Amino acid sequence: MSVAVGMISGLLMGVVFGFALEKSRVFEPGMIVGQMQLRNWIMLKVFLSAVATGAVALAVLNGFGFVKLQPKAALYAADIVGGLILGAGIALAGACPGTTLAQIGVGYRDAIFTLLGGLVGAVVFSYAQPWLAKSLIGTGPKLIFTDLAGIPYWQGALALAAAIVIILMVIEKLRPWREDLGADVDGNGSEKGPLPRSRLAPAE
């Protein structure tokens, strides 16, 4: 694949992703913080749906030999520490790396500072990475769960997708998505009370 084709396909996929993100309302700060506070479950539903869709796509592509799996090393310490730091940042900012640009696009001024903080963090990490690789990140085995189970990847991926669909059906039965949207379709306004609108209101 040429660089131009890769850039165009990446741009098109980004447009589709952004459109889906806006329609699902997952970019809303109230939706993100609400998920962290376990007040609504739309964010988890969307992410699990994406995992299930990706598993089916990879099962088909890998099963027919169109793509070859390139697993990353399992870095348990880095994943745990990094996940906790990322989760704390998402809860405080009401945004994650995938939603910041969408928030800026619809007028959330706070998201500009989130974007700047993310860029600074990326630069700091690039300088700290050599030290982290020796002290924290290190190396780890490249694991594929289907190899541990002794089955072809496509079978395991389809089984994972089916399990996620069942989980989604149970969650939706317990917490319908329409109730979690809130009165303003922004994830605020649950039984525990809305988040302060002064902080979340988009720019006029």
Image: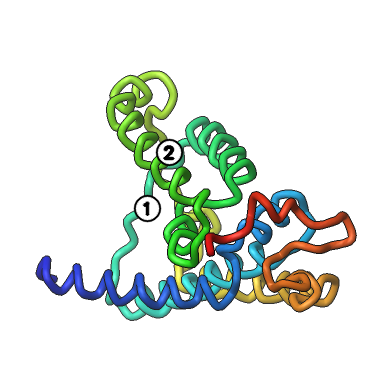
Please give left or right for residue 130 compared with residue 203 in the image: left
Distance from disc 1 to disc 2, alpha carbons, whole Å, reads 29 Å
* Residue at numbered disc 1: 71
Please give left or right for residue 19 compared with residue 166 in the image: left
Residue 183, image quadrant: bottom right
Q: Under tag 2, what secondary structure?
A: helix
Near-viewer residue (126 or 132): 126
Q: Under tag 1, what secondary structure?
A: loop
Precedes in sequence: disc 1 or disc 2: 1
Residue at 69 percent of width and 73 percent of height: 185
Residue at 70 percent of width and 56 percent of height: 197
Q: Is residue 55 above or below residue 72?
A: below
* Residue at numbered disc 2: 117
Residue at 39 percent of width and 35 percent of height: 121
Near-viewer residue (136 or 105): 105
Label 1 sits on what residue type? Pro
